[in-house]
Image: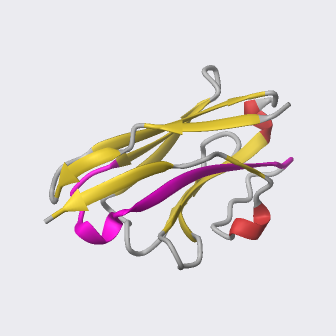
């Protein structure tokens, strides 16, 4: 059974940093492209960042480019999202997602991911 579990969210002030982690089990982590998404109540889920199965390729939403860094440790089955210079508009529930792939293709479309965690809340105050 595949499990995806996020952690690391919290309440911070604008300008501060957080690092989210996502651990997986029940899958061969290195065979999966991974992504971070966020969603506020009543809004569509938004792609934040994605990383290819090897970690060689990454992509970011324009709103977080230069502030967030995605990385992965395939030996630890763990995905990370380092979030710096946080803004109040970054407040959301953050989700980790996975899809098996045999290429280095990455995408920020939620429809292109199969396994999802329950989310971790990030709240940024001004």
**Which quadrant of the structure image shows residue 76?**
top right
Q: Is 28 rendered above or below residue 99? A: above
| Residue extent of the magenta highlight | 83-102
Q: Is 27 rendered above or below residue 103? A: above
Q: Residue sitting at 37 percent across and 66 percent down? A: 64
- The residue nearer to you, when weighing 25 against 49, is 25
Q: Residue furthest front?
A: 41
Q: Residue sitting at 50 percent across and 41 percent down? A: 71
Residue 67 placement, left or right of 12: right
**Which quadrant of the structure image shows residue 55?**
top right
Any magenta on residue 96? yes
Residue 80 placement, left or right of 23: left
Q: Is 43 rendered above or below residue 8? A: below
Q: Give the percent coordinates (x, y) of residue 46.
A: 55, 71
Residue 114 placement, left or right of 35: right
Q: Residue sitting at 69 percent across and 67 percent down? A: 110
The C terminus - image quarter: bottom left
| Colour style of the rendered protein structure | secondary structure
Any magenta on residue 63? no
Q: Give the percent coordinates (x, y) of residue 33.
A: 71, 48
- The residue nearer to you, when weighing 124 against 78, is 124
The N terminus - image quarter: top right
């Amino acid at each position: 059974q595949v499990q995806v579990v996020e952690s690391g969210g919290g309440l911070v002030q604008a300008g501060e940093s957080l690092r989210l982690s996502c651990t997986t089990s029940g899958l061969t982590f290195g065979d999966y492209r991974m992504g971070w998404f966020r969603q506020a109540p009543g809004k569509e889920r938004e792609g934040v960042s994605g990383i290819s199965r090897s970690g060689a390729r990454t992509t970011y939403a324009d709103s977080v480019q230069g502030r967030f860094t995605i990385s992965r440790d395939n030996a630890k089955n763990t995905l990370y999202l380092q979030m710096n210079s946080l803004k109040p508009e970054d407040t959301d529930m953050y989700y980790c997602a996975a899809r098996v792939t045999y290429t280095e293709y990455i995408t920020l479309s939620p429809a292109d991911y199969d396994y999802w965690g329950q989310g971790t809340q990030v709240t940024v105050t001004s």
